[in-house]
Each structure stands twice: as C-alpha cells, then as structure tokens.
Amino acid sequence: MTEALPFSHPYNLARLGQAGDVVTLAPDPAVRAAIARWAGILVLESLTAEVTLSKAAPTRFRLAFRLQADLTQACVVTLEPVPAHIRQDFSRELHFSGPRRRLPPTEAGESPVTLVGPDDEEGPEEIESLHYDLAGPVLEELVLALDPYPRCPGVEFAAADEAGAAPESPFAVLKRLKPGS
C-alpha cells in the first residue's frame, strides 16, 4: 500500500479547451507543514507552482510546470538549519488511453508485445482517467530537487582520527600469523 500524498489538486482534463488553461497551486501553511514532514525537511516556508495546460490532440495533453519553493533542511554534519531556494521548470506529456483493452492474441496464441529499445525516448505518460492530480508531479519534482546532503556554509565532514596512529598493514598482520615468526 502506498502512502497518500499530503497535497492534491485534481483537474478534469475533459474540460480543457483548445485555448488551454493556467492553474496556480499554492498550499496553505498547514498543508506546507504536512509536505515538509512527508519530504523529510524541517520547514517549507513557501511553495508555488504555475501549471500551463494545453491540448496537443484530442487524447494528448501537455503540462508545463514552474515550481518555486523556499525551504529549510537540516545540515548533515551539524543538524543546523540550512535555507534553500528551489526554482524548477519541467513538463509532462499525457496520453489518455481510457480503460485498457486487451489486444487479441496472435496466431500463435501469444499476446502481442511492443519492445522499447534502450535508445528510444520515453513516450507520454499513459493515463486511464481524465481526472489528473496536478500536485503529484509538483511534489515529485520538489523532492528530486532537494539537496541530498545539505551543509551549513564552511562545514566539512571529517572522520574521527584514531590518536594519529597509522593503520597496520595487512601484510604485517599476516607475517605475525606465520609459524616461526
């Protein structure tokens, strides 16, 4: 079972006209606090996303996102707060396929399979419902944009020094184990 996302903004793509639409997402402080807990950060001071939707074909949709966030993470060395600003532009292409229909088996009785080579581009995201959650990609990109190892300015991680002693060579240890040494 997957955990529910802390923020949702459903949009009915069936209502999207040829002129397109622009939707602004700006969660309130309580929702931002829930997103911060979900993302594992200290504070999410602000989060806004502008989504420009357009219809590429009757069953294809393009979504262009502009994400901005101000947040605070914990330094991985000192645990002190580290402020960050994220500004990310990304896009999604959706293809409405409706409920999946099984293709008839081939003459040999096997189901047809489409192979995608490693050099082929990833196609549009297949969706089975025209009700699409615009907040899902925003949260996904927010988490991907986080610094995995935030540090306070000037802080470096240094391994503990064992009284300045150089580690013993593995060959010296083996020599001591040899009979007659």
Image: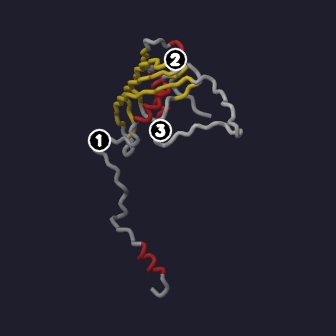
Residue 55 percent across, percent down from the top left: 47, 18
Q: Are marks 1 and 2 in contact (CB under 8 Å)?
A: no
- Which amino acid type is marked by label 2? Pro
Q: CA distance from mark 1 to mark 3?
A: 42 Å
Q: Are marks 1 and 3 in contact (CB under 8 Å)?
A: no
In what element is the residue under mark 1? loop
Q: Can you tell which quarter of the image residue 47 is in?
A: top left
Q: Which mark is residue 153?
A: 1
Which residue is at a point 44% across and 14% down the rendered structure image? 20
Q: Which residue occupies the foreground of this view, 49 or 151?
A: 49
The residue tagged 3 is: 120
Q: Can you tell which quarter of the image residue 87 is in?
A: top left
In what element is the residue under mark 3? loop
Which residue is at a point 42% across and 27% down the rendered structure image? 91
Which residue is at a point 49% across and 13% down the rendered structure image? 16
Earlier in the chain: of badge 1 and badge 2, it is 2
- Which amino acid type is marked by label 1? Pro
Earlier in the chain: of badge 3 and badge 2, it is 2
Residue 14 percent across, percent down from the top left: 54, 14
Foreground: disc 1 or disc 2: 2
- Which amino acid type is marked by label 3? Asp
The residue tagged 2 is: 58
